[in-house]
Amino acid sequence: MELSILIARIASVLYLSMSLGAFFNADYFGRLAEDMYKNAAMTCLGGLMAVILGFLIVSYHNVWRKDWTVLITIIGWLALVKGVLILAFPQFLQRLSEPFLTGGGLRVFPYVTLALGLLFAYFGFARRRA
């Protein structure tokens, strides 16, 4: 459970930071998403980071319980699969991601990251331990 709390705390800080950035500097996040796939080195680096983080979470936190900790496992698996797809099929993943990286997707992004950040902040920092 301690690992779950640590990962929840890290995830909350990351998601809340991205949410604040997206709320107050939406243009920057739009350019960031656009530039990611234009630069092959950044695409590869993003894929490598996703594989490493996903693999670490899946290796050390592959928990399939009916509680909040399963969210961490699901995010780990999604990161691992996304990283593999970025490295193996970058153009395919770019086309698949396009609706999320433009227009409506960018308008929803800050709210989704805010919700995830608050959820993980609750479980990582505020919730009483049994």
Image (cartoon, rainbow, N blue to C red):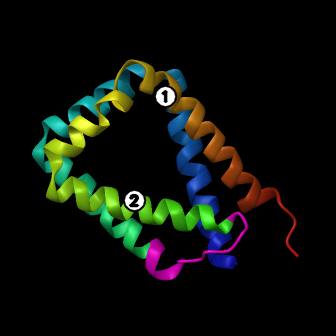
N-term mark: 1 or 2: 1
Magenta segment: 57-68
Front: mark 1 or 2:
2
- Main secondary structure type of the part rendered in magenta: loop
Mark 1 sits on what residue?
22
Q: Position of residue 10 (x, y in %)?
A: 57, 59
**Residue sitting at the far left:** 40
Q: Position of residue 15 (x, y in %)?
A: 55, 45
- Examine the image and state in which quarter residue 70 appears: bottom right
Q: Is residue 36 left or right of residue 105?
A: left
Quadrant of the snapshot with the N terminus: bottom right
Q: Give, as a three-letter code, the residue at label 1.
A: Ala
User: What's the CA distance linking mark 1 and mark 2?
Assistant: 20 Å
Label 1 crowding class (10 Å Cα cut-off): few <14, some 14-19, many 20+?
many
**Residue sitting at the far bottom:** 60
Question: Is 95 located above or below residue 93 in the figure?
Answer: above
Mark 1: which secondary structure?
Answer: helix
Q: Give, as a three-letter code, the residue at label 2.
A: Ala
Question: Is 129 located above or below residue 87 in the figure?
Answer: below
- Magenta stretch: residue 78 in it? no
Q: Is residue 43 left or right of residue 23?
A: left
Q: Residue at x 50, y 31 (%)?
A: 109
Q: Nearer the viewer, residue 53 or 62?
A: 62
Question: Is 85 located above or below residue 54 in the figure?
Answer: above
Label 2 crowding class (10 Å Cα cut-off): few <14, some 14-19, many 20+?
many
Q: Position of residue 42 (x, y in %)?
A: 19, 47
Mark 2: which secondary structure?
Answer: helix
Quadrant of the snapshot with the C terminus: bottom right
Identify the disc placed on residue 65.
none
- Marks 1/2 in contact by CB < 8 Å: the verdict is no
Identify the disc placed on residue 79.
2
